[in-house]
Image: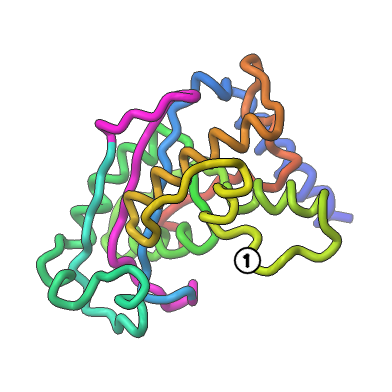
């Protein structure tokens, strides 16, 4: 009973927090990471891409891209994203990228496709760099897609919620995959299309997405 009460309280607080944001007047930043693996407990960041927008408008001048100089075991990741050791060695320090991201994280609602994986990697990066803790609000386009798919299928088709398949389902064009900046732009475009698919009105606030399970709040740099 206590756990249930705490869950309800947490959900109510989240709803209250997101109710302060008008959907089409909010500043969003889509963030994508290229990683060394899909294991949240071990993965390291090899590149970061991001792009911002307000409401239904995307500001291409806000694009940012950082290749990270890492000594982590790359495994098979270069085959996927093309960031080989020689490219990474010319990259920047992880702390420099975190410094560039921090102001956006404080001022914008973040958009991810697979927030759990990327936020786990970012949380580790914040702690690794000794960066100040930051409370962030986020929306996960993967979870928005799963919410819609679960209404249509008892058993989800294989690979039905990948970024490219989600975009294809909503009539968005193909894009160059596995570059962090391209993926960030593709994610923000997908989010805007999902708002239309969900029938979100111009007067709505972000708490209208609470029921989808796709919104959240987390403190980066927390243990």
Hey, which residue is sitting farthest top in the picture?
Answer: 203
Q: Residue at left 58%, top 55%?
A: 165
In the rendered view of the protein, which quadrant contains the N terminus? bottom right
Q: Look at mark 1 in the image and give the residue it sits on.
A: 159
Where does residue 66 sit, x and y in percent of width and height?
Answer: 22, 54
Q: How is the image coloured?
A: rainbow
Where does residue 108 sit, x and y in percent of width and height?
Answer: 42, 33
In magenta stretch: residue 196: no
**Of residues 105 and 78, which is closer to you in this image?**
78
Q: Is residue 5 left or right of residue 166?
A: right
Q: Is residue 132 left or right of residue 28?
A: left
Question: Looking at the image, how many numbered discs can be counted on the residues?
Answer: 1
User: For residue 57, what is the image quadrant?
Assistant: top left
Hey, which residue is sitting farthest right in the picture?
Answer: 1
Q: Which residues are magenta?
A: 39-62
In magenta stretch: residue 45: yes
**Of residues 39 and 151, which is closer to you in this image?**
151
Q: Residue at left 58%, top 41%?
A: 171
Secondary element at tag 1: loop
Q: Is residue 77 shown above or below 203?
A: below
Where does residue 63 sit, x and y in percent of width and height?
Answer: 28, 39
Q: Residue at left 67%, top 31%?
A: 207
Q: Residue at left 21%, top 60%?
A: 67
Q: Dot 1 surroundings within 10 Å: few (below 14), some, or many (20 or more)?
A: few
Secondary structure, magenta segment, majority class: strand
């Amino acid at each position: 009973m206590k756990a249930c009460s705490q869950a309800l309280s947490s959900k109510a607080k989240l709803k209250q927090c997101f109710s302060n944001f008008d959907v089409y007047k909010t500043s969003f930043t889509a963030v994508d990471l290229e990683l060394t693996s899909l294991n949240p407990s071990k993965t390291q960041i090899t590149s970061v891409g991001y792009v911002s927008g307000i409401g239904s408008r995307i500001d291409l001048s806000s694009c940012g891209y950082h290749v990270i100089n890492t000594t982590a075991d790359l495994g098979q990741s270069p085959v996927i994203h093309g960031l080989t050791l020689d490219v990474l060695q010319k990259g920047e320090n992880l702390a420099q990228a975190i410094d560039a991201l921090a102001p956006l994280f404080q001022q914008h609602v973040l958009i991810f496709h697979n927030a759990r994986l990327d936020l786990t990697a970012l949380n580790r990066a914040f702690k690794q760099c000794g960066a100040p803790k930051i409370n962030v609000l986020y929306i996960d386009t993967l979870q928005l897609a799963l919410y819609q798919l679960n209404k249509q299928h008892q058993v989800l088709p294989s690979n039905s919620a990948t970024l490219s398949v989600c975009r294809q389902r909503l009539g968005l064009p193909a894009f160059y995959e596995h570059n962090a900046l391209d993926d960030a732009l593709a994610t923000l475009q997908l989010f805007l299309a999902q708002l239309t698919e969900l029938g979100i009105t111009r007067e709505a606030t972000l708490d209208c997405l609470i029921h989808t399970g796709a919104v959240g709040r987390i403190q980066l740099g927390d243990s």
